[in-house]
Image (cartoon, rainbow, N blue to C red):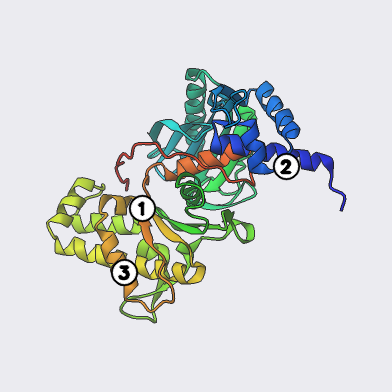
Amino acid sequence: MIINKHIMRTTNEKQVLQQIVNEGPISRSQISRNLSLNKVTVSDIYSELLHEGLIREVGHGVSTRNGGRKPVMALLNVDYGFVLSINILRQRFTILTSRLDGKSHDYASVSTRNVDMTTVLDMIEDRINQVVEDHENRLLGLAFGLDGTIDDNQILDAAIKGLKNFDLAKYFGDKFNVPVVLENMANQAAIFERDFSGEGVYDNLVAVTIRDQVSAGIVTNGHLYRGHRGEAGVIGKCPLADRYTEQNHETVNHYVSETAVLKQIMECQGINRVDVNRIRRDYLGHDEKLLKILDEFTYYLAKVLANISSSFAPDAIILNAPILELLPELMDSVRGYVDKLAIPRKAPLLLTKNAKEASLMGGASAIVHKVLGLDDLQLTFQNERNVVMEQIES
């Protein structure tokens, strides 16, 4: 078989850079051993990466038992530039700045209540310009997340009016002259769990996000599965039999979405804005009406999760839902209902460690992969962000 030398070279460059990102500080000799590559090949690639500024040297390691010179160690140069991850939600957008090693800072949430989409885009552009102006390094790429169906960086369907079929990637790519990655937030959450939980921890997982819609991000053998035209994981539109009358069917969104549950809670409490403190207080006070609403929610959610567990047999199902972050005790009820179901395999049900920023950090990982040219290789980052509870919006 004749292998194109340029393709071999590109593959080798990717693997060397992947080693430095995941294992750094690391020496050239160690990279050579890890990859079973010729030392001259590794040194040549190393020198090019160093010249480009993508990596930096950080002193010397320990010499071998036979003595000799101590090896020079290299790390990814996090000052090479930064990326921004932005999620567009129903009444706000959130934005997070991240370094190339996945470490993030400067989270912000901007209200867009009663604002049209054109103005929202202008607000996002202004915020990006502000971050670029304040940052000492250059912007390398943008990631956008939203509720909807996305295929090949195109929005085929969106929960937010005005985004369907809008070329968001080209719009912001042209304005800032950087690559742009679009993804639905469930897929972003799945990327976060894969890349920030530790190498190989979740090679097969399903990340379920519960907000305006119920969606699932699916990782199989370490790779994101999008299905036909990005439609994998659109579980919110699937029918679900009524708990009391099986002949009646509504969608999963009708029973389980955060929007539907919060609407019931607000009607029960006689208010028109979500009060998370009151929800928590009424729950701990065993308010019967609230407990009934939440019991219905956990029952139907358990049915959904049982189907996912049986269909995909993941290492874990990880839930990303502000209502569960507010009331983590509900997970016991969800697990209890799942245990009662006769399904062949019950995957562990876990709450994400960072519901507020999980999808943003997953988006950051996706654009870092793109910027570094490592789309098809695993990168492992450290999750060092502090978890801060955010208000649930109606």
Q: Position of residue 296 (x, y in %)?
A: 28, 67
Q: Where is residue 20 in the image (x, y as percent from the top left)?
A: 59, 34
Viewer-closest of 59 and 227? 59
The numbered mark at residue 333 is none
- The residue at the far left in this view is 285
Marks 3 and 2, how far apart at CA: 48 Å
The residue indicated by pointer 1 is: 321
Viewer-closest of 322 and 64? 64
Which residue lies at the image location 31% right of the left edge and 59% below the top edge?
261
Above/below status of 343 relative to 122: below
The residue indicated by pointer 2 is: 11
* Circle 1: residue type: Ala
**Secondary structure type for disc 2:** helix
Q: Where is residue 378 in the image (x, y as percent from the top left)?
A: 58, 46
Q: Which of marks 1 and 3 is nearer the N terminus?
A: 3
Marks 2 and 1, how far apart at CA: 39 Å
* Circle 3: residue type: Tyr
The answer to whether the residues at label 3 and label 2 have Cβ atoms under 8 Å apart is: no
